[in-house]
Amino acid sequence: MGPMQSAVPIGRQHDNSDAWVSERRFYPSPSDSVVSSSFSLIGINTQIQYGNGSHPGLILKNALDAKEQHRKFELVQRWLSLDEGVKTQIKTFLLQTLSSLVPDARSTASQVIAKVAGIELPQKQWPELIGSLLANIHQLPPHVKQATLETLGYLCEEVSPDVVEQDHVNKILTAVVQGMNASEGNNDIRLAATRALYNALGFAQANFTNDMERDYIMRVVCEATLSSEVKIRQAAFECLVSISSTYYEKLAPYIQDIFNITAKAVKEDEEPVALQAIEFWSSICDEEIDILEEYGGDFTGDSDIPCFYFIKQALPALVPMLLETLLKQEEDQDQDEGAWNLAMAGGTCLGLVARTVGDDIVPLVMPFIEENITKPDWRQREAATYAFGSILEGPSPDKLTPIVNVALNFMLTALTKDPNNHVKDTTAWTLGRIFEFLHGSTVETPIITQANCQQIITVLLQSMKDVPNVAEKACGALYFLAQGYEDVGSSSPLTPYFQEIVQSLLTVTHREDAGESRLRTAAYETLNEVVRCSTDETAPMVLQLVPVIMMELHQTLESQKLSSDEREKQNELQGLLCGCLQVIIQKLGSSEPTKYVFMQYADQIMNLFLRVFACRSATVHEEAMLAIGALAYATGADFAKYMPEFYKYLEMGLQNFEEYQVCAVTVGVVGDICRALEEKILPYCDGIMTQLLKDLSSNQLHRSVKPPIFSCFGDIALAIGENFEKYLMYAMPMLQSAAELSAHTSGADDEMTEYTNLLRNGILEAYSGIFQGFKNSPKTQLLIPYAPHILQFLDSIYVEKDMDDVVMKTAIGVLGDLADTLGSNAGSLIQQSLSSKDFLNECLSSEDHLIKESAEWAKLAISRALSV
Amino acid sequence: MAPHDIRRPFKRPAISDQQKRREISLLRQAQNRRDAQHQARCLASTVLSLQNQNSEPLSESAASEELEIALETETGPEEVDSEHQARDIDVREASKLKGAEARRWFARQLMLPEWMVDVPDRLNHDWYVFARPAGKRCFVVSSNGTTVSRLRNGSLLHRFPSALPSGARIKDVSRSTQSYCILDCIFHELDQTYYVIDMVCWAGYSLYECTAEFRFFWLNSKLLETGACAPPSLYHKYRFSLLPVYNCDEAGLHTAYTEAVPYVKDGLLFYNKHAHYQTGNTPLALVWKDENCSQYVIDTDSKGQVPNQQQVILAVTR
């Protein structure tokens, strides 16, 4: 077996822990063709196409899933279909490789074992695996023990806990925790064991309910945080972070000890360890914020897990510990996108603590702010400002407003006068936080008044001329300042400054250094928000902005022969400009008088968008597409004149599997165009429907695009009415299989249930559009054969009891649409359905206005259908 | 099993503006889809046109003419002929008609009762009874921010603001502009109130093909919601009022017949619970008058003249 060891020369890289084993990492052994062909079976062959029609349900199920899952499924099937003898041989080789003297070979073998286990254990195959691994633990050579622990760790990462019997779980945990024990002299073994425990924690549900076992595990983890080896300490803290979210409710007996350990690490340990120690408390905050949110929620008034108020109890010690970290800033962290250090982690945690405990944090932080904010050392001023900015979300406005009123002037002065850029950056960010959380129509006592509005705006506009990172934060502050006036009514306090603000933002976009610190992006985003929140008073100025932005966009199209770097910049700028035009179109299109004036630009704008498409960059494509959707809505039936030229880009967008956002946005635009053109879209429907059907059958397209495609069927049917007839034979079976797959969610996790509901809603919107499209047509009878299945679908999702409000509203509406269009033809079917009774009654008594409205409509339609 | 990345967003808003633009677009699209769907649902499935009227089975109308029992007679056949060219319009379009066209259309849309000349089968099971208010029978149409009432001959009675859906020019974002209502009413001069006897369309939905049972249920639950039954105000010139409707059992009949009501009674109306709203005369709606429950037992024609012949029913046996 000599060649075997050298046959696996490339170790798996750590940063690829969740990637499916790739063929590139395995070189077939020249002397062992069995192994080589088998490895290629695990790794290669991702391009296999299923023959059409063999398992339609299966294909669709995978098509509705992420493409990676589809590939995984194929590979799993390939492995399972291998000859038993070959598989046994491979598995034996793999286990033997764990004893290899080459570290990379051991490491790779442990990952492949875990992958194979991930396939076989759920099939109740390879029952002896865990036994033989555990036997390895007692082997003498430490490198075998280390490789075996690593394998157990990967195995726990690959395999779901429910396929490993409790007896094996116990033995794995025992082996792992023993390996972690302080008595283990070999640090490689101890590290492998600690990292293995991180993955094995999910298996320890039963063990964590047993006081003795839990105590033992916790003791070993806590001891490992004191190891002399930094990697072990870090891995042990990672375990604590994971425990804090997985076993929050079991932590009470240990929290005091953990606090001491983390406090020590934050104060003294190396940064990677200290960061994990802070993360422990951030993670506890996440848990308690979730629990308290559920407490305060309208529905249950309770949470499955009680809140132990660990943060509240730790507060007097926790806050000083975090404040201390704020003084450990790095010089240029604001210019470094990837920076993450003690001060940043500490401030972030402080913000989470404020959200967890609310008002209680204020008196604990105020002395620190007051003491440091005027100090000569910039670190102290910045830390004080950052502390202030961090606690602005959480405490009540009553508590914060008086403080902010005092601080505001100081902040404005600091933003203009402080000599340090870091301080100014944080000051501008803090102003933004003040406007985000304490300014707006819901806040009783306004922070921004007639008296200080002008000063605030002057300072922010001035600050937008500062260095890029400060200017970017000033734009951010202005963004939230504008947002606070979103519901201000017909007259906004910003009106007198509107022109100046817009002018200043445009000036920022032209700065030479606007490419740094995402300044240009921030300026356009703020311009967008200023436009979105503008009132009728400033509509003429928004209109004036149209030719300005159009000219900018035009200029990006003039430059030729660009380097790839320049092209990327051009594309980015086009994206920003299209985004801005989209916001303007949507704003002006929402009221008749401004829409009318805006329309004079429609032809030119459309022309620009078409030229942008010719540049072909995904993000520009998407932004232009979004903007065209808004334009189609504003233009209405006149949009037909753009269709001949626009159609090819529409098709191109629908074909863009790679950038699924582009595809999704294009699907939405098809809907916009359907509503704008109505029956005039007919000439383009063959192409569009073909593309949509291809998208649905594709297993490359991201699953999130599929529900909107179904909804789009409905849009098309509603637009072209009975002309949808020719697509019925394709669309209906698709809808039917998707409906069958989405009818039941049993055992699915929250994410899957959410997706299933999106899918159901799309399917139901399709049915709704099709029924309404065919209403009053002589071809109505074409739909009758589909009625039983649709009613059955409604019944089954009702019985399933896991639909959300949106699905409920759409579903009961479909019942009405079916009755409305099919009338007495479906009378007895409707009467037999559960939906027309229990489900309808439930919806009729719903608290949700939209559900109730749909239900009343359904009741009316059914009553009409039954009484004919 | 590398160290796990714990970086959290730093000095960044929760979502990017691009994501916000996407989300706002999706919201707009969802809203537009909802509007389109709503509009489609409101397109009434019944097209009530003048031509359809003309093609009604001859025997039925002939029979009713022969008997001459109808107080509220149908428009003469010669007029129907003269409008043979009239286009098919559904109630939704009709709600927007103006002038002479509206007059012609509405002149033939009311459901008219026949005299009660015998006791229908299953009277106590299948029928409602209520005391008819004295006054002008009319259609009340609310649409596009105004409310119009039209008499049996289609002529205009009032144009006024009301609290009915789309009945007044007030900003109400929750209602789409497609919304409109058609009510079958009697305008009672004395208290300047529209007594609603039937509901034909509500908030854009047609109730033509619904049973009386359902229409009355819908009428009772919906009218109150709008505030149309409230006393007159700036945007609500006339009060609307519901009538007490009873099952046709002994107690119900007795109550309808003798009960004191806030309006002047003009006979009793009987409605078959299962009947749809049908334009013109129908034996599924009946009217009874005697001197105890009506001042207008003696029939008059549309000019107020007493005709040569009077229809008399001597007794109704149970």
Image (cartoon, coloured by chain):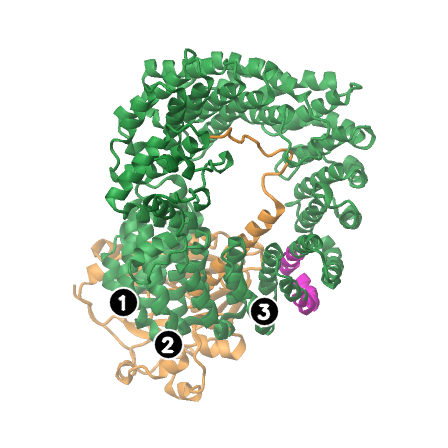
| Protein chain holding label 3 | A
User: Camera-side residue: B297 or A108?
Assistant: A108
Q: Which residue is mark 1?
A: A785
Q: Colour of chain B?
A: orange
Label 3 vs 1, first from the N-terminus: 3
From what the image shows, is residue A121 above or below residue A679? above
Q: Which residues are magenta?
A: A581-607
Q: Where residue A840 sits in the image (x, y, percent)?
A: 32, 52
- Disc 1 marks a residue whose amino acid type is Pro
- The secondary element bearing badge 1 is classed as helix
Q: Where residue A141 sits in the image (x, y, percent)?
A: 38, 20
Between label 2 and label 1, give the one nearer the viewer: 1
Q: Which residue is mark 2?
A: B300
Circles 2, 3 touching at the beta carbon (< 8 Å):
no
- The secondary element bearing badge 3 is classed as helix
**Residue at horizontal 65 percent and vertical 45 percent from the top:** A486
